[in-house]
Amino acid sequence: MLKIIPGWQVKLLDANHIQTTGISSLELMERAAKGFVDWWNGKGFDHSAPVNIFCGAGNNGGDGFAIARLLDTSGFKVSVLKCFDESAKLSSDALVNFKLLPDGIRVMDWNEFDKSKDGIVVDAFLGVGLTGELRSTAKAIIQKINSFDGKVISVDIPSGLPSDDLLSGACVRADFTVTFAFPKLSLLFPEHAAVTGELILVDIGIADTEYDLFDSTSYYLRKEDVPFFHRKFHRFSHKGDFGKVLIVAGSEGKMGAAILSCKAALRSGSGLVTALMPKSERQIIQIAVPEAMCQFELPTDLSRFDAIGIGPGLGVMGKSALLESIFHRFKNPMVIDADALTILSENPDLVHLIPKGSILTPHLKEFDRLLGDTSNHLARLEKAADFCRSLELNLLIKGANSVICLADGRQVFNSSGTPYMATGGSGDVLTGMLTSFLGQGYSSANAMFCGVYHHGLAGEIAGEHYLRGTIASDLIDAIPETFVQLGIS
Ligand SMILES: NC(=O)C1=CN([C@@H]2O[C@H](COP(=O)(O)OP(=O)(O)OC[C@H]3O[C@@H](n4cnc5c(N)ncnc54)[C@H](OP(=O)(O)O)[C@@H]3O)[C@@H](O)[C@H]2O)[C@H](O)CC1
Ligand SMILES: [K+]
C-alpha cells in the first residue's frame, strides 16, 4: 500500500529519491510531465482543441512548461499563460523548462486568456508548495480559470487547495486532477470532490519503500496491492475451508437486502451461507438464492459459523435483543451494517459488547448517528481513529474513496469504485462480501482490503456496461470478473 505523506514532505521525498537513485530533480519533473501526457494521450482528446496551460513560478509551473513542450510535440496547439510577473524568481527546474519551450508555443500573461474560446485548460499554477492564505493576484488567476466553461485539468492538485487541510479560500474547480507519486490527502475528502473532479494517480518511479522514512497513518489502496491480501487455497480445499457464514438480514418488505448479501457472499467464495430471517419470508429467499440455507431462530451455538454479517434490511423495532444475544454468543469478528448500526446508535451500551476486531460499515449519516455529528472529513477521521483504537474495532467509512479505519490506527483510502455505485443495495452487497472474506479466514484488515477493493472494482465493471442504470445485482454479477482482473484463482 502506498503511504500518504503531508504535502510539505514531498521535497524531502524527492531529495531522498534523487540522492539514492542518482537521477536529477529535472528528470523527476520530466517523468511527472511524461506521466501526465501519457494519461492525456490515453484520453484521446481532440487535437484541434487549443490547450491553454496556466503556469506558476514554482515546480508546479515547471511541470506545466514541460507538459506544454510534450503536448506541442504530440501535435496539440498549446499556449502558456504565465501566472507570474517579470520580477518573479522561477524555481531552477521551472526556469530550465521555461527556456526549453519551443518557438511554436505562444507565451502570454494570464490575464490575456480569452475564456470564451473552446479548448482545454491545464492548471499548473500552484501545487503542494502553497503556503498560507492566497495572495490577491492568485485569487484573480483562480477566478479566471474558473470562469472558463470547458474542461479544466489540474496538475498534481487544484490550485488553491491545501494538500492536507480543508479548503477555506478560492480554488480551481477541476474536471480531472492528475496527481503525482501519491494522492495528496485533501484530494480524498468528500467535501473536495467538486474541485478535484476525477482523480488520476501517476507513478513517477518512487518506490513504496521510500516512504518508510516518513511517519503517517494514512495509506492508499491500489489494484496492485490487493492480491497480497488474498489467501491461497489448494486443490484439496473443500467447501468447509471457504467458510460457513451467517447473514442476519431481511424483514417483511426488505428481503431484497438479505438476498443481495447472501448472493454476494456466495459470489465472493463462501462455501456455505445461512440466512437468519423471519420464517414468513422464507419462500422469497429460497427461490432467489437456492444455494443459501435458512434459519428462523438464532441458534444457541454460533461457534459453527466462521463469520456473521448483520444488518441489511433487518429492521430496527424489537431487534436490539437479537443483536445483544449475538454479541454474547459469538466471539469472533463480525460485520455490522445498516439497521444494526442504527440499533447501536439508539443503544450505545451495546457498542461495548461487540466482538473485538469486528467491522462496522457506516455511510456518512450512519457515522454521525453512531459517533456524533462531525463538521468535516478531517474531524470524522480523527473521531474514527479514537473509536477504533479505544474499542479495538474497525470502521469502514463508506463513500467515494471509502476509508478503512483499523484498530491499529491505520486509515486506508480505497481507490476503486465509480459514482454509479451510489444505488440502493450496494451496501448490502458489500456486507456479504466482507462477511465472506472474514469467513474464509482472512484477518479483519485483509477482509476489508479485499472486500472494499473488489466491491469498487465490481462497480467499475458493471458501470462500464450500465452507466447510471447500474443496480446492486449488477455488482454481484461482476464479482467473478474482479477475481479474473486481479488474477486471483
Ligand atoms: N514528487 C513529486 O510529487 C514531484 C512534484 N513536482 C511538482 O512540484 C510541485 C511542488 O513544487 P514547489 O516548487 O514546491 O511549489 P509550488 O509550485 O506548488 O508552489 C510554489 C509557488 O507558489 C507560490 N505561492 C505559495 N504560496 C502562495 C500563496 N499563498 N499565494 C500565492 N502564491 C503562493 C510561490 O510563490 P512565492 O512568491 O511564495 O515563492 C511559488 O511561486 C508539486 O505540486 C508538483 O507539481 C515536481 O515537478 C516533480 C516531483
Ligand atoms: K495545480
Image: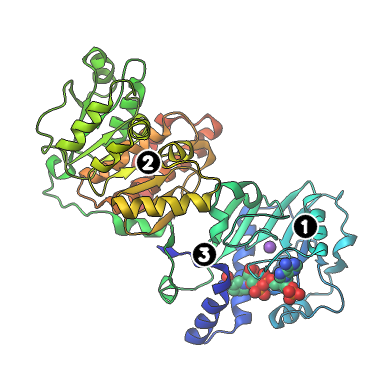
Left of 287 or right of it: where is 465? Answer: right
Name the residue located 28 percent from the left edge and 30 percent from the top edge.
Answer: 262
Check disc 3 and give the amino acid type.
Phe
Q: Nearer the viewer, residue 393 or 304?
A: 393
Query: Residue 361: which disc?
Result: 2
Queried on whether the Cβ of the residue with tag 1 lies below 8 angstroms from ligand 1, the answer reads no
Q: Secondary structure at mark 3?
A: loop
How many angstroms separate mark 2 from mark 3 (CA)? Answer: 26 Å
Taking 282 as reference, is 23 above or below it?
below
Within 10 Å of the Cα at label 2, are there few (<14), some (14-19), or many (20+) other Cα atoms?
Answer: many
Which of pointers 2 and 3 indicates the residue nearer the eye?
Answer: 2
Circle nearer the N terminus (1, 2): 1
Taking 167 as reference, is 15 above or below it?
below
Name the residue located 41 percent from the left edge and 50 percent from the top edge.
Answer: 384
Check disc 1 and give the amino acid type.
Ile
Q: Position of residue 326 (x, y in %)?
A: 20, 33
Q: Secondary structure at mark 2?
A: loop
Query: Residue 142: which disc?
Result: 1
Quadrant where the N terminus lies?
bottom left
Q: Nearer the viewer, residue 400 or 392?
A: 392
Are discs 2 and 3 less than 8 Å apart at CB?
no
How many angstroms separate mark 1 from mark 2 (CA)? Answer: 38 Å
Q: Position of residue 437 (x, y in %)?
A: 26, 45
Are discs 3 and 1 less than 8 Å apart at CB?
no
Quarter of image, res 292: top left
Queried on whether the Cβ of the residue with tag 3 lies below 8 angstroms from ligand 1, the answer reads yes
> Is residue 61 visible to the viewer in this orientation of the structure?
no
Left of 474 or right of it: where is 356? Answer: left
Q: Position of residue 39 (x, y in %)?
A: 60, 59
Query: Residue 182: which disc?
Result: 3
Taking 74 as reference, is 91 above or below it?
below
